Amino acid sequence: MLKSNIHFKDADLGKIDYLLDYWRFDITDEDGEIIGFALNGGRRQPNLDSLQDAKKVINSLSEFKQAALSFCNRQGEVQDFCKGLGELVLDEVFMQNETGSFDFDFGLTEWEDASVIVHFVNDRPDGFTLGD
């Protein structure tokens, strides 16, 4: 694991590390799963709008996660991509600079390199990207 020498201290989230061009921290969700968060920003601090947005997402994580999964279930291309490869598991949330814009990056339990990214705009699922 890479380590960062640049840190930002947030009163609510604690220490946030600058690593690989993003400000990064982990949370543990209600199921005990570790979810990574990545925020844009400069080398001195994360983008403060992204930081506030991240807190909003964390406070409603289960609702946003359910919205993303429901969105995936309505997309035939996503269903075809995932078929027979296990369950979608939330790995990381990428916060964008624009308020209400973020990406949920899901992996699949039976395909280590798979990625299903759900793009949120105005706090709603708005598109997806599939990758392996």
Image (spheres, grey):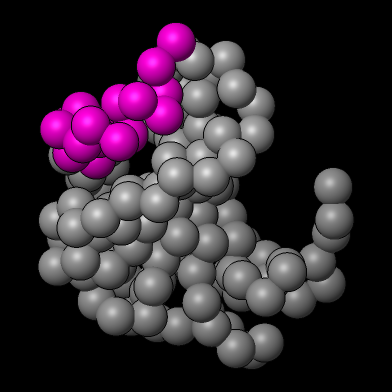
Q: Does the magenta stretch include residue 13?
A: no
User: Up-down: is 11 above or below 130?
Assistant: below
Magenta-colored segment: predominant secondary structure? helix
Is residue 85 depicted above or below 59 in this figure?
above
Residue occupying the point 72% across, 68% down: 19
Q: Where is residue 104 in the image (x, y as percent from the top left)?
A: 38, 48
* Residue situated in front as seen by the camera: 79 or 1: 79
16 to the left or right of 28: right
Q: Check the image and report above or below for 130 versus 76.
A: below
Q: In this view, does 43 lie to the left or right of 41?
A: right
Q: Quadrant of the C terminus?
A: top right
Q: Can the viewer see residue 12?
A: no
Closest to the observer: 1 or 12?
1
Where does the image place residue 112, in percent across and percent down from the top left? Answer: 65, 26
Q: Which residue is drawn at 67% across and 66% down?
A: 17
**Left or right, residue 72 beside residue 132:** left
Q: Is residue 78 visible?
A: yes
Span shown in magenta: 68-84
Name the spot of residue 67 as percent of width and height, x first: 17, 39
Which residue corresponds to the image point at 25% horizontal and 48% vertical from the top-left? 59
Q: Using the image as rendered, state which of residue 69 and residue 53 is in the foreground.
A: 69
Residue in front for this viewpoint, 7 or 62:
62
Q: Does residue 30 lie above or below 50 as drawn?
A: above
Seen at 45% across and 60% down, the residue is: 94
Q: How many labels does the image show?
A: 0
**Toward which corner of the image does residue 22 lie, by quadrant?**
bottom right
Q: Quadrant of residue 84?
A: top left
